[in-house]
Amino acid sequence: MKQKDVKNAKLAAAALLALVGILVFAEVIDVEGRMFAVVEFYTAFEPTVVSWNFPGTSTNPTIIRAGNFVPEVIVKMDPDTQVDMSASTGQVDSTNWAVYWDFKNDPGKVYLGKIVTAIGQTHYIKITIVFKRISETKTYTKTVEGYVKGGDVKGTWYLNQYDLSALGQYGVLRIPLSGSVTLKFVASEGASFVDSATFKIWKHRAGVPVENYEAYVATPDWTVALTKASDTTWIGLWTPQAGTYVMYGYVNIGGSNYRQLSVVPTLDGGTFGMNQWIGLICWALAAFTAWMTLKK
């Protein structure tokens, strides 16, 4: 190797050594092999139950919306504690239910699956939660229980000013007919549970029992969906003809329909319905007969 080449190689090595020194000095290259750790400080405390959504008693159950209900328990725990899913248990009436834990939020939530509840139906619910320490074998057990009842809805159904609910089940009412009529439902209890209110109406058919029309005539002749007019009132319009009808009134709660009205009104055509025309003809014939008699 020529002397000039040796000199250039030494200069290149010196430049490379200087570059490494700069990188090490700037800690771009870490030759100390240092380790980093994130340390979290917290105050340990015993896990607690904050609240649950079924605190009612057997004589005073928690009123819930009929349909699907999810029992929930809100819990508070420190970072060294978790819910032992295998040891925790759930119970609805006399049936065992799986327990779930939502640990993403603070406070956390322990819950069961959805319970299908009908109007007036009562359920006993019990959830036993087992908490365990991550850093030790210590456990804590918390139990909550209570009763829930599917919320009932009470109210009055109207056709114009006539109280259909006052007729009793399958009562018969004769109503003068004059154009469109107003159908209305006014809730006196449980209005917040009502999703919608509907009339199903059939022309009365001879031989079909009025107590279960849907089993014989599945599709109503009219379905009148009432529009919510206020927090407690639903209203709709219907234009019938003279005749006898079977009318059912339904409220929808939690996706299920509940029949609350079953009546058989007769709409007789108002001032000049069929009966009035027959009466008018009879009067005319009587007057004509009397006039012919007196004329002789």
Image: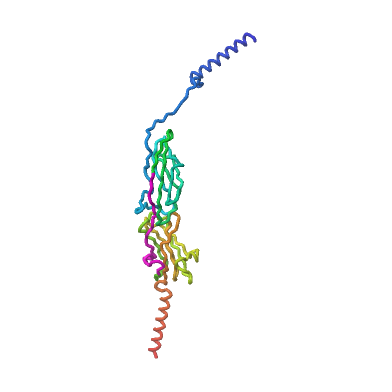
Residue occupying the point 40% across, 49% down: 125
Residue 230 in the figure: left or right of residue 200: left
Q: Quadrant of residue 10?
A: top right
Residue at the far top: name it: 3
Seen from the viewer's position, the closer of residues 19 and 129 is 129
Rendering colour mode: rainbow
Whole-percent x, y for residue 283 in the image: 39, 81
Seen from the viewer's position, the closer of residues 88 and 177 is 88
Residue occupying the point 45% across, 62% down: 224
Residue occupying the point 37% across, 37% down: 46
Whole-percent x, y for residue 246 in the image: 44, 67
Whether residue 19 is situated above or below residue 167 in the rendered picture: above
The boundaries of the magenta stretch are: 143-171
4 inside magenta stretch: no
Whole-percent x, y for residue 120 in the image: 40, 57
Residue at the far bottom: name it: 296
